[in-house]
Amino acid sequence: MPTASDPAEGRYLHDLARRLWPIPRSITGDGVRQTLAILQQEMPGLTVHEVPSGTEVLDWIVPDEWTLRSAILVGPDGEVVADAAVSNLHVMGYSEPVDVELTLDELQPHLHSIPEQPNAIPYVTSYYNRRWGFCITHEVREQLKPGTYRAVIDSTLEPGSLTYGELILPGESDDEIFISTYVCHPSLANNELSGPMVTTGIARWLMQIPSRHYTYRIAFVPETIGAVTYIARNVDVLKERVIAGFQLTCIGDDRRYTYLASRDGNLRIDRIAKRVLATRENMVTYSYLARGSDERQYCSPGVDLPLISLMRSRYADYPEYHTSLDDLDSVVTPTGLQGGLDVVRECIETLEGEAVLVANQKGEPQLGRRGLYHTVMKKTTPEDVMLRTNILAYADGTHGINDMAELFDVPAATLESMIAELVDHDLVRLVHQSNRNELGVKI
């Protein structure tokens, strides 16, 4: 796959994003189905699932399906103030149907704009409370004249289903690496399309690999309710099999690289991601306290997946966020997408290629009878003996050589020879990280 210096895959994904750009996506409806149908052309094997409205999913209920056919707001002189055919951001998401005439004062509570960004159309939704509204630039709003306005929203809110996509790429092991992204926003570039595009690029790359150790589970879901639904339907297998996970969003601009930690904050995937992103300029780190996307669901108590979020500019941290300014020309770029793709790929390559250490005995083994411990007890412990015991202490199936080198603050080469010695004595073994009991201590 090309590197960031030759972003051929990034350009391909950027072109694919342009195909998806005009589709009016929401948390339910044909916009999600149209998006997944296009992605199926890129990822043979991507299956589409429908979950009926009214289905209980954990503490949530799948809502009615929203279908928007058209939405237009016309001013007193017949001028078009907002038209969903021009920008699908012009209508508030999940607006109920309406066809009314009203004065400007009566209209104002149904209008949304951002005074601080007068040229931006805001992205606004009301998923679980019945409302209707139009989103316009504040510049346009300031120029509205008194008179009679006609607001027409041709939509339905009726029982239907929630739609999500799933791709399973089998590996040599049933242990899984989980990747999730969301497909529920309309024409927003970084906050919507960058996640599905980088995820598609990762899937295309994985499908070209002749031999994968891990199985890969890839989900394209509506944010929040889609992730909740996916967990409700798959929680047992996720908890049993997933050894590492990624939430991918806002991963297509050129400004920075962002890592948001798992709830634990010190899982192996946390350590790998921090090392990978440390090689990039403008790297920003957040704790789980800064969460805001579907990591909220996947890392929640009772689910507890070993999952992190990878982004370029984090949601809400860039000025175009949730506005029409978040576009495919000035915000998301081919090089930005390629950079996001390369970071995720490097993390996966590390998981695939770097073994972890597992102790072969319960308790601390007797090193002295193997010639690995000093025979005369003094006030201090020799450095090499202490290092051996540290290796054994962290040979728990979640630490690789680089993890230990970082933790112990010693070169990896120093550890390699010492680990080889411990392997020769059958005190530890090197294996792939696993979520299964076979990595437990030999009995």
Image: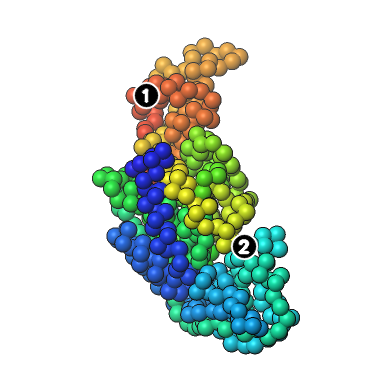
**x 69%, y 75%: residue:** 144
10 Å neighbourhood of mark 1: few (<14), some, or many (≥20)? some
The answer to whether one can see residue 174 in this image is: no
Choose between 92 and 270: the one closer to the eye.
92
Q: Looking at the image, is mark 1 or mark 2 earlier in the sequence?
A: 2
Viewer-side residue, 130 vs 1: 1
Report the disc number at residue 120: 2
Residue plotted at (33% across, 48% down)? 205
Q: CA distance from mark 1 to mark 2?
A: 60 Å
Q: Quadrant of the C terminus?
A: top left
The image position of residue 279, as x and y in percent, is 50, 34
Q: Is residue 254 above or below residue 113?
A: above
Residue 18 visible? The answer is yes
Q: Secondary structure at mark 1?
A: helix
Q: Is 310 situated above or below 50?
A: above
Q: Residue at x 39, y 50 (%)?
A: 11
User: Mark number for residue 290?
Assistant: none
Determine the residue positioned at 71% across, 84% down. 147
In this rendering, would 20 be left or right of 146?
Answer: left
Is the residue marked by circle 2 packed among few (<14), some (14-19), or many (20+) residues within 10 Å? many
x, y percentage for residue 186? 50, 66
Q: Amino acid at mark 1?
A: Ala
Image location of residue 426, percent across then percent down:
35, 28
Residues 297 and 395: in front is 297
**Amino acid identity at mark 2:** Ala
Q: Which quarter shows the N terminus?
A: top left
Q: Position of residue 290 (x, y in %)?
A: 62, 51
Question: Dot 2: what SS?
Answer: loop
Residue placed most toward the observer, 420 or 265: 265
Q: Is residue 392 left or right of residue 102?
A: left
Q: Which residue is mark 1?
A: 420
